[in-house]
Amino acid sequence: MAMKNVIATPEYRQDTLLEEWWNSCEKGNLLPALKKHWRIFVLSVFGNNHDPGKEERLAHKFLFRPMEYFLCRQDPEVVFEELKAKNMPSQLCGKVFKTGEPTYSCRDCANDPTCVLCIDCFQNGAHKNHRYKMNTSGGGGYCDCGDQEAWTSHPFCNLHSPNEVNQDEKNPIETLPVDLTDRASALFMAALQYIVEILTWNQCDNLPSDLQVEGELNDTYITMLFNDEVHTFDQVIKTLQRAVKHCTAQQAREFATLVDREGRATVYRGCFTSCEQCRTIIDSTSRHGSKPLKVQVMHTVVVAHQTFCLRLMVWLQKMIEKSDGLRRLFCLLSMKPQEDGKSLMEKLLLHDTQLWKVARILSHQLLMAGVLMDQECKKQFAVIFTKWYPNVMRDFARDDHDHEVCVASLSVQIYTVPSLARMLVTDHDLLDVILVPFLAACEEKKNANGVLSLSKADRTPSFKRACFMLYDLKYALLCKPTSDEWSDKLRESFLRGHQSFLKLLKMMQGMDEVKRQTGMHLEYEPEWEGAFNLQMRVDDVISSFTEWCSTDRTVYIEAYRQAAQMLSQCRDTTQKSEQHTVCGHTVKCLKYDVQSQPVSIHLPLSRYLAGLHVYMGDYNLQFGCSELNVQGLDPVKMIEPPLRVQVLIAQSQAGLWRRNGYALLNQIYFYHNVKCRQEMYDKDILMLQIGASAVDSNEFLIHLLNRYGLLLWIRPEYDVPTGQDDNVRQTIMLAEEFLNLLLIILGERYVPGLGQVTHEDTLKREVIHLLCISPMSNSELSKNLPDSTNLKADIEDAIHAVANFRKPTSVGTAGSGKFELKNECYKEFNPYFYHYCRTDQSQAEETQIKRKKEEKSANHTLPPPVPPKFTPQFAQISNLLQSDVLVHILSLILQRSVAVRSRSWSETQLDRVLHLIGLALHEQRRNIHEGNHNFDFIGKALKGEPNFTQLLESLVTDPKNISHDSTKDLLSWILQKFIEVRQMTSSAEANGPVEQLASSSKEENEAAKKRKARLAAKRKEKIIAKISQMQQNFIRDNADLFESTDADSSLTRGTSEMDISESAHHETPVALGKYQSLPCSIGITKATCILCQEEQEISHNSRAMVLAGFVQRSTVMSQCKSRNPTDGENLDPLFTSSDLHVGSFTNSCGHTMHADCWQSFFQAILVKERRRLSRIPHSLSYNIVQLEYLCPLCESLSNTVIPLVPALHSLVTDSDLCDVNLSFGDWLDGLQKTVKNATKQESSSASKGDPFPFLPSSLSSITKMMADSVASNFQLLWQYVNNTKGGRFSESLMEMMKKFAKDVYSFGLGVDPDDMNHRVSIVAWNTCAYTIINLEQYLRYENKPLFGASPSRNVDCINALVKFAAVCSHIMPQEVIKKHCLRLLSGLLSNGLGEGDDPQCIIDVDMFHYLVAVTMALPSLYTEGTTASNLPLNSLNNQYILELVLTAHIVQVMLLHDRSQDGEEGGMEMENDADSVALMSMYTEIRRKAGCLPPSNNDPLPWQLTRHIKRAVLPFLRCATVLYHNLTGVPIPAQLQEWTEEVEPFCSYLSLPTSFSELFLNQGELLERVVNQWCSSDVLRSRLYSASSRSVVSYPLPVNHLIDLPDDYSQLINQISSFTCPSSKGNDSQLPTMCLVCGLVVCSQSYCCQTEIKDMKVGAATEHTYRCGAGVGILLRVRECQIVLLAGTKGCFIPAPYVDSYGETDQGLRRGNPLHLCKDSYKNLQKMWFTHCIPETVAHNIESHMNFMSIHWQHL
Ligand SMILES: [Zn+2]
Ligand SMILES: [Zn+2]
Ligand SMILES: [Zn+2]
Ligand SMILES: [Zn+2]
Ligand SMILES: [Zn+2]
Ligand SMILES: [Zn+2]
Ligand SMILES: [Zn+2]
């Protein structure tokens, strides 16, 4: 790098400098003096590319400390302390939220949902006892605690409760010393001026002249890369690696992360030419799509000053936070207009979008800490912000940064403050200020008709960004004035805004018109989403405007007039009219054909007017009254647009719009959807109701009939066939829809102002109808209810008023509770409820009929409910019911129902007509009660010939056309009701016979029904009998098929341990030693192949059978979580480490197959998948490359098969088991001699480099050294167990044994398969041991007995594993097994542990693994021939091995006693028996030899020691029992089939003494020597007394469990909010993810923390999982409240075990209800993890969630 002169740190004297500054300050020109200093020092501090720490130090020394001294004139710390003491701390908390911090809002007290608290304020305040919501912050925004305007009550927490002194009146600046104020003013002003100057400076290669260094600039430049929203991380990384010299992938990744986080990054430093070269390459190679990456070459000096600027802003923020006086001072200065009329603050505001990300964020933070924290200044700032609002929004729309990093996002901090908003609306026209720029943005989107057209083709982001203004509008309208808060100024300003708003609605009226397509289908799906998106954003604003209008009469009238005028200006194509006459009423109708002319579903203006209209009654106004005085306000014209929409939908239902495709169907769907309907469908119905109340009833109906095209249909002659029947079916459906609309217009009165109801009533009715469909959980309910923010009633209150909460029934499942409707509410059920879709309606009806039947009430009718009364303004609507036209229609349909044949009749029509009649009867009844005689439906209904009674009666007596029971029931109910009401009317006379007829017909009807029911029952019986006959035949024909579906029934097991308790009564069975009991057959003896369904006996020489199995590496039992799993390649698995830090686990679903059947099955998958893999990689839930497959029967994840070996004792003849007489001492002696005399092999043999080149010498050479009797017995030990009975294992069994051994080896160690590796058999023994220990620990954790409590698949699996371990030496060369055996023996009997590179000692070895290995290896020690073939069935060998290993284990326990967590507390004091005393002396002796400290107070009493030992060795004994039970087949005694913590039953089964001291005493001096050897090892000493690299365990090994989680979820969120990314110093992590196994938090799914494992890029979670869980992980994504399960490169998400008070989880934290830990579901997770079910769960979840397939889980 060519540096002309290095920027050295120049001479520096603080005193002189300060003197100069103070002098300049007094003269009023501080800035030039500061600049003079900065000119040199900024460059030397920030221009030299120092490391961050040094830069920080230098900046403090040369730049910030002088300023602090300047300000204070003495030690700054002292002055700041003084200021603090005088400070009146602001009552505002104002804590600025970081990403991911929890925020709380109170649903009871918050003024709006943007009012939030930080966790400290929340926990120290009253709202935690209210109904609150929590969320995680997306960054930005601050805590509103202390802001009286944000809360209706409890505005302060205990931390921010107001001071005694009234501070409001006092200007805080006055508390500052005068001279300090002067200096602070000068310094703040200068600093701000400098900041603004630098940040708005737009040249890259030089500075303003007063900052430019004297002389020529060095040629040191920087290539600066900027953020954009177009390029992906990978693209940036690739480009950088290409463009920047020597840029590694890691560096490129860091640059990319930095650019993303800060908005820019220095990617290269050097001379101008090389920087420019770098820039050119980036510019030319990054043109992905259209735009290249933004990159600039900047001179170092410019960048240095920019960097200083950022620091200066941080420093200023720190200064003003020291005192509210300084803060006020700063705010006033920043808002003081400069020469050009703009304040410095305004300049920053207007320059925002030209800054890079971090500069913006810092300047916003300075604003928040300054002006927004000071009530007085906030007001001024609000005015300034509003003044520049159009400019700010225009810049924002053109910008490409996220909303939260733009200054536009500050609007929420201002406009949600009611007092500010009210002030701005009144005095600064806020509504218009917001709407005008938005309308301007809309202007560009208008089509030729002046209507908005938001097509995808020209969907620029700028309009989407402009829509943020609608949020501001919503905020501005939050402060609704009460009726006495209105002033003339407010009215004027509001109405101005209102007028602008109507312009917007007018532009939306008629968006996306549709025209019925005939002939061809539409070629393109037309646009529809854009319009709906806009509509949804405007929804809140519409309802706010309506509410504002409703509080002031003057405003209301003017607003109504404005809206009506605006509506009348809307384009309308209808000019012509035509006349129609029905029932003598002639009406002039508008001519319009929905089938051929365009219709739009977007009518916001009409709907807005409808919304306003319902308030008319509040002001005693009426349609067309003089006060309103609206020209051309014609109700017929007003109902026209909504009516067209209803007809359009009816026609679409009738299939007339099929060719218009999905766009129309989607529009109709969303029109009715709960998210949109409030301002769409509901308002259309309201408008029709307004019409019905304002237009003559007959005329209204004729308009409807005309628009529906039903004028012909209502003519009686329509029913006569004319030969042209094409449209009849469509007409029938349209008629049904028409009747439905009438039911809605008449029955839907739950709108306050329309019906006499409250907002609560409305909401309750919604809930009732939802719950009539089925009981629902809280989240289901809230999903189907309108957004709570727009409601004036509380959802929860409404729910509780009508429903009961029922907790989840089954304990232990994490299911959610459901709400059930209260009984008294069912009568409100209306099947024609207008918010039901068709499916809802039929489902609800079905549920209700079922409920009625279950109630066993005689009456199954679901009559129309009694609707509330209309308000007086709308009372005329009910007049429809007695209008001539309607009565005519009702009568017509009743007649058609009675008629023998009718071509236009349908049962649906009749059902609707009956409901209409029901409504009319309810209305009549109400009128009678109220003494109102104007309503006379009955009179009209009885007029015609035949009249209604006659028609109804004939239908009741002969319901031949009616198929539904519900309609029949309703018919009877209507007739009954009709008669009742008729009696009530004065015209009721001589109705006796009618009544009789009605009731008799009813009786007859009942009788007929019963008869029918009997017949039906009989028929049903016959059918059932027939079906069951057929089923049985089918089962007989397919017998094996049925058997195979049940896994358990397909296997024949030998006597299972449950069945043997019988025999156990006689004599307690003993598994080992001389008195070994007779074995019985355990495990599978006969099985059915699930693939070919054939049954197969398990024997050594028949077709081999296998179990589907899964082998995985496991760390779940690790006692040392910090230790990484050893690399499988270099692991010597012979002595398993006592901390069990990694092992291999095998499990099975228990399904059996023929080996050959499985082979062809697996081959078929391979072929199929290979073909598929080439097309779509990663398309499976299992990894075929890892040999994974799904069990063909139960789809359990599997990756191997476990061969089934027959019961071992069946392989040897009984005579083999002869008596051997050998003492333990002699046995031990023989083995030790074997070890000592092992012959060293020729190094020339095949095993070159063999670390253990020994083999046992011949048996005779050992026995030579023994006494004769001992020698012969010792010889006998090795002779009898030859597997000679049935000959060798079959080919196929051998093959499967090899296959399983190979798989266990490669999956269990995580290495490539290697048949001949000497470790193969060891790993097979180890997986057997590890699996048994895991089962034992799990059962212990659950307090379940060892036998009888596990599912049979586990029992079968362990049995198969033990037997396989026993015979697996058959597939290995004999020498290898012999060597293993020798090494194992030398480990305990000689100094075998302490040798080698990694010396070990007695406490390093897991004794159960050792026991299994030595048991399986020992029989091969002296076999002859090339293949080992002895079975581990010698009861004496086994007994002595167990004694030896248990002795070793007890020594371990004694050595580690003081580390045990097993406290001595509790339990009764006991006698010290002889055993205890003996053990105690051994304990002392052993510890003395091991160099333990002399006895101290910590040493236990003898009885305590014994108790401890028993407790500590119990797990080992339990494991040994499982092992020998499965090995020998000796049945389990009854005692052990129950949970016990006693050791005695185990000892007696295992033929061990119950006094453990006997294991040591009288066993010969050899044992003593061996024990001595264990204890005097140097390695042991260093383990115990020096901080060795390896941790030391304690016994009994505790069972691992997942980390403890706090009960309250927000605690967890808070805990995690302080977490920062470990690889990019101190920066927020987007997805902090917590390992539930060890509690570590990692920065997941982010480029900053990506690493590589085996050449694969992995995220931090995968990397951690690889180390912590050997590739299997269970982690919690705290901010999203979901669990990630990882297994290799696959994974899935499941909900976190946290539930709200309704028992529901909240994955993604969307609902925000307070969450608490669900102990049961956490326990289930614990179980899933501990029993190794994570890979299985992942595979199943991937199967059911297709989207999991596409996630790159390894990047998490
Ligand atoms: Zn707070
Ligand atoms: Zn507070
Ligand atoms: Zn509250
Ligand atoms: Zn088969
Ligand atoms: Zn299975
Ligand atoms: Zn990170
Ligand atoms: Zn972990």
Image (cartoon, rainbow, N blue to C red):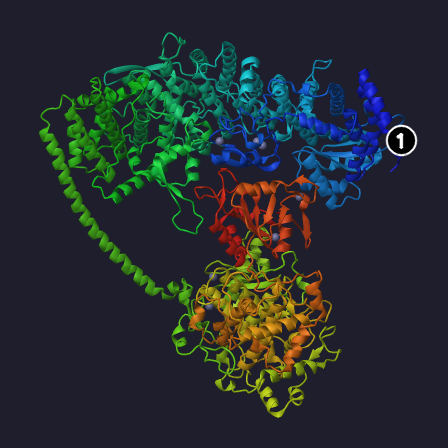
Q: Where is residue 1333 in the image (x, y as percent from the top left)?
A: 55, 65
Residue furthest bottom as drawn: 1268
- Residue 1509 left/right relative to 9: left
- Determine if residue 829 is in view: yes
Q: Which of 1570 and 864 is in front in this view?
A: 1570
- Image quarter for residue 1423? bottom right
Where is ligand 6, by quadrant?
A: top right
The residue lying at 45 percent from left, 63 percent from top is 1351
Q: Where is residue 810 in the image (x, y as percent from the top left)?
A: 39, 51
Secondary structure beneath dot 1 equals: loop
Tag 1 residue: 11
Q: Which of 607 and 725 is in front in this view?
A: 607
Vertical side of 646 occupied by 1196: above or below: below
Q: Which of 1089 and 1268 is in front in this view?
A: 1268
Q: Nearer the viewer, residue 1546 or 622?
A: 1546
- Image quarter for residue 1005? top left
- Image quarter for residue 91? top right
- Determine if residue 1431 is in view: no
- Residue 1179 left/right relative to 989: right
Q: Where is residue 1108 in the image (x, y as percent from the top left)?
A: 51, 64
What amino acid is labelled 1 in the image?
A: Glu
Q: Where is residue 1553 in the image (x, y as percent from the top left)?
A: 52, 77
